[in-house]
Amino acid sequence: MPKQVDHRERRELIAHALWQVVDQKGWARTTMREVASEAKVSLGQLQHYFSSRAEMLAFAMEFASEQSSHRVAQGLAALGPEPHPREVLRLVVVDLLPLQPDSRATSRMNAAYVLEAMHDSSLRDQVGNQMRAGRAMVEQLIRQAIDNGQLSSTCDPAIETDLILALSGLAPLLDLKVIEPSAALAAIDKHLSRLFDSP
Amino acid sequence: MPKQVDHRERRELIAHALWQVVDQKGWARTTMREVASEAKVSLGQLQHYFSSRAEMLAFAMEFASEQSSHRVAQGLAALGPEPHPREVLRLVVVDLLPLQPDSRATSRMNAAYVLEAMHDSSLRDQVGNQMRAGRAMVEQLIRQAIDNGQLSSTCDPAIETDLILALSGLAPLLDLKVIEPSAALAAIDKHLSRLFDSP
């Protein structure tokens, strides 16, 4: 189905253009016209793929989430077979933070997306479901680590999951250069040490 | 100086109106006209107090930060003399999260403010300075707790400060109802227990 592939490719190209524009100007100032110009398509063509700003944002975030899973999967492959859950959680958390160009763009987009979702019910469901899926994945990792004896059986998997996800709260400190990337990594490692090394 | 008091009062009234509008519509959709209407002043009067959206946002956030300090101070007073640093940190973190109507509005405003700051250099300095001041206040609490033997002397104050501030990362999970307020409080208490009870 070459036509569908083209359609998907074009949408991904537009999503990349959207990340660029949002990274430079912020979502509040991003117009469909500017995204079209960045993606080198006409406004009419853009509207063929996305009928509204919100729809474009929703697709861009879905794509960002796929890209993030892809980066994490690549990182996992580099860790070799049966990586320790501590290393897996570290990869997941690091990818949530603006520490590399790709995750920097998507971390900022994500902040805009969450804000936008609070005032748009269709986006709200999508963002909420995406967050719930991410949360479930982390909780599964933690439950498995408890089952395998890598984490203390006194750990509450739900609480530990929320504490892992809370580390994304380092993003604004990094974005505004209140802390250095090395400080964020040290904080993540300290949290993981405390979690995995406690009796 | 009654005139100055009036000026300040009017600006605070406008800041409250801004919170309302942002809470309902999001910053991206907030216009000065709507804020004027919510504050029951004319657009011309509003522009007498604030020459731009960014200036209005900057004042509203400064005011929000004062209000937050005020809420924390009230909470501290309720804890009695010489409260334990663990209780102080708990109050500070809880106030960063959207758990009560006032802090809900300011937590959302804050997210909009941080995003806006990344694309506006004058706001960026203000937000960065405000974050640095908040961070320094938390670090001071932690250093004092170490000096007083309430926290292990092996703690790294900078790392523990960043981990405390990272708990604000629970805000989007609460805003999108991915977790309940009770889960956020359980996560905060678990983190504080681990910090203060570890040898």
Image: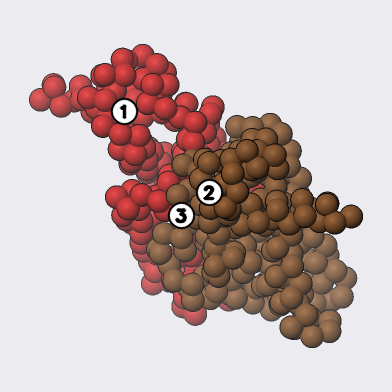
Chain colours: A brown, B red
| Residue type at numbered disc 3 | Gln
Q: Foreground: B169 or A121?
A: A121
Residue behind mark 3: A24
| Residue type at numbered disc 2 | Ser
Residue behind mark 1: B12
Task: Give SS at disc 1.
Answer: helix
Q: CA distance from mark 2 to mark 1?
A: 41 Å
Q: Position of residue B177 (x, y in %)?
A: 69, 40
Q: Position of residue A95 (x, y in %)?
A: 63, 67
Q: Is residue B194 left or right of residue A86?
A: left
Task: Determine the residue located farthest toward the left in the rendered image.
Answer: B1
Q: Position of residue B31 (x, y in %)?
A: 42, 27
In the image, residue A140 above or below residue B53: below
Among the 4 quarters of the image, the one containing residue B138? bottom left
Among the 4 quarters of the image, the one containing residue A52? top right
Q: Foreground: B121 or B184?
A: B121
Residue plotted at (65% across, 42% down): A45
